[in-house]
């Protein structure tokens, strides 16, 4: 994507099938370097097969998760918190639905 999150990490669209086949079969939609060792810490990855309307939500989730883990939070805790924040972001983005 060539874009950066508010924390300075860059987003990249990647071939999700390749990532699953070569690195981790559980990898889905997105990832960050604090969760996955194969992803550089300064990068946030989004599966190129993900519908475009989901990109902002996945990017938001990965950015939040990476920052929480950078601060010392475990993956499980960071993922749960990022998921809640993502849910709020989704609701704010679609008022009245």
Image (cartoon, helix red, strand yellow):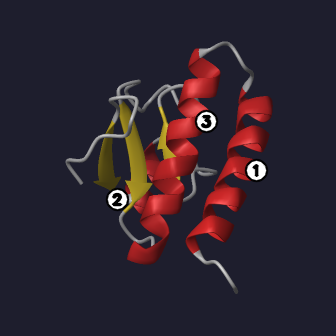
Q: Position of residue 72 (x, y in %)?
A: 68, 13
Tell me the distance, in whole angstroms, between the alpha carbons under discs 2 and 1.
Answer: 27 Å
Looking at the rendered structure, the secondary structure element under dot 1 is helix
Q: Is residue 51 visible?
A: no
Q: Which mark is residue 65?
A: 3
Q: Residue at x 60, y 77 (%)?
A: 94
Label 3: how many Cα within 10 Å (few below 14, some 14–19, many 20+) = many
Which residue appears farthest toward the top when viewing the image? 72
Looking at the rendered structure, the secondary structure element under dot 3 is helix
Foreground: disc 3 or disc 2: 3
Foreground: disc 1 or disc 3: 1
In the picture, the quarter occupied by the N terminus is bottom left
Label 1: how many Cα within 10 Å (few below 14, some 14–19, many 20+) = few
Residue 4 placement: quadrant: top left
Between residues 46 and 93, which one lies in front from this camera angle? Answer: 93
Q: Residue at x 32, y 45 (%)?
A: 11
Residue hosting label 2:
15
The total number of labels drawn is: 3
Looking at the rendered structure, the secondary structure element under dot 2 is loop
Foreground: disc 2 or disc 1: 1
Is residue 18 found left or right of 71 in the rendered image? left
Sequence-wise first label, 1 or 3: 3
Tell me the distance, in whole angstroms, between the alpha carbons under discs 1 and 3.
Answer: 11 Å
Is residue 9 found left or right of 53 in the rendered image? left
Is residue 2 found left or right of 16 in the rendered image? left
Q: Which mark is residue 84?
A: 1
Q: Position of residue 63 (x, y in %)?
A: 50, 39
Sequence-wise first label, 3 or 2: 2
Placement of 64 over or under 94, stated as above or below: above
Is residue 70 found left or right of 52 in the rendered image? right
Tell me the distance, in whole angstroms, between the alpha carbons under discs 3 and 2.
Answer: 21 Å
Between residues 60 and 15, which one lies in front from this camera angle? Answer: 60
């Amino acid at each position: 994507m060539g874009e950066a999150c508010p924390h300075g990490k860059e987003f990249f669209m990647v071939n999700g099938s390749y990532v699953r086949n070569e690195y981790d079969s559980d990898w889905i939609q997105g990832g960050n370097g604090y969760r996955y060792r194969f992803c550089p810490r300064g990068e946030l990855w989004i599966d190129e097969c993900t519908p475009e309307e989901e990109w902002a939500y996945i990017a938001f989730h990965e950015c939040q998760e990476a920052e929480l883990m950078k601060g010392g939070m475990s993956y499980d805790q960071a993922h749960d918190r990022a998921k809640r924040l993502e849910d709020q972001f989704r609701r704010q983005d679609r008022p009245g639905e």
